[in-house]
Image (cartoon, rainbow, N blue to C red):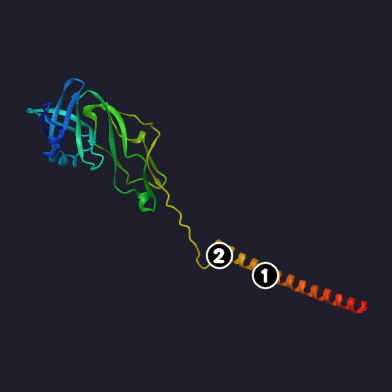
Amino acid sequence: MLTLQAKKRKAEVNPNSLRHDGKLPAVLYGPDRETVSLTIVKKELTELMKEITRSTRLNLKLDDTANKVFLKDIQYNYLTDEPVHLDFYEVEDDHVVEMEIPIITVGTPEGVNSGGILDQLMETIMVSGKAKDIPEIIKLDVEELQIGDSIHVSDLEMEGLKPQTPQDRAVLSILSPRKEIKIDLTEPTIGEELLVEEEELEAEEEELEEELEAEEEELEEELEAEEEELEEELE
């Protein structure tokens, strides 16, 4: 079990002053203890967080006493994304807690080697159980999974734990490969075919307009000839 050193913090100490000094304000609480304000060295926390998950149980050393705790909550600066405050939760081994456990896969599925796609639908799962039974992570061996196979919540090995998610919910699946749509660039596209049809229609309209103009000219010539004949007869 990993250890983190803490010191008690007096109420009058300004949290912002602590942060400027490379430290973080924190609080330790639990159902069977009084709440205590703490100070944590930020650098030590940063190194520790590289090795733990949110469900890791820690030894929080305070006044030479090791307290078994969960890092229950981390508050972050919304601009810098740096931690600004921590909540540590201390419980006895047999105390029942609810905790979110990360789920990771181990190995490469045979179905993926065959061209399939690993689709992990759940990255974490909420469980309840005794504090001593809470794991850091849940590992899933996926090497033998074929295309079409799935792992459900009911398939997870969680002895002593009760999942807070329906048993039939899929955790991950191996999907069939997506079909590629091949486009023959030598064949005209729909857009090109429409453009050709539009050009043909425009040509037909121009030809029709020319025919109408020719007919109108011919009709005008006939009318002029008739008028001339009529004028000659009147004379």
Q: Residue at x 38, y 32 (%)?
A: 167
Q: For the residue carrying disc 1, how many other residues have a C-alpha within 10 Å: few (<14), some (14-19), or many (20+)?
A: few
Q: Residue at x 52, y 68 (%)?
A: 186
Q: Nearer the viewer, residue 2 or 4?
A: 4
**Residue 131, image quadrant:** top left
Q: Is residue 170 visible?
A: yes
Q: Position of residue 40 (x, y in %)?
A: 13, 34
Numbered label attached to residue 161 = none
Work out which quarter of the rendered image holds the C terminus and state it: bottom right
Q: Position of residue 64 (x, y in %)?
A: 6, 28
Q: In the image, 155: left or right of 26?
A: right
**Residue 2, image quadrant:** top left
Work out which quarter of the rendered image holds the N terminus and state it: top left
Q: Is residue 1 visible?
A: no
Q: Position of residue 77 (x, y in %)?
A: 23, 39
Q: Nearer the viewer, residue 164 or 75?
A: 75
- Tally of marks: 2
Q: Earlier in the sequence, mark 2 or mark 1?
A: 2
Numbered label attached to residue 192 = 2
Q: Position of residue 209 (x, y in %)?
A: 70, 69
Q: Secondary structure at mark 1?
A: helix
Q: Amino acid at mark 2?
A: Glu
Q: Secondary structure at mark 2?
A: helix
Q: In the image, 97: left or right of 203?
A: left
Q: Residue at x 75, y 74 (%)?
A: 214
Q: Amino acid at mark 1?
A: Glu
CB of mark 2 within 8 Å of CB of mark 1? Answer: no
Numbered label attached to residue 206 = 1
Q: For the residue carrying disc 2, how many other residues have a C-alpha within 10 Å: few (<14), some (14-19), or many (20+)?
A: few
Residue furthest to the front in view is: 235
Q: Nearer the viewer, residue 186 or 178?
A: 186
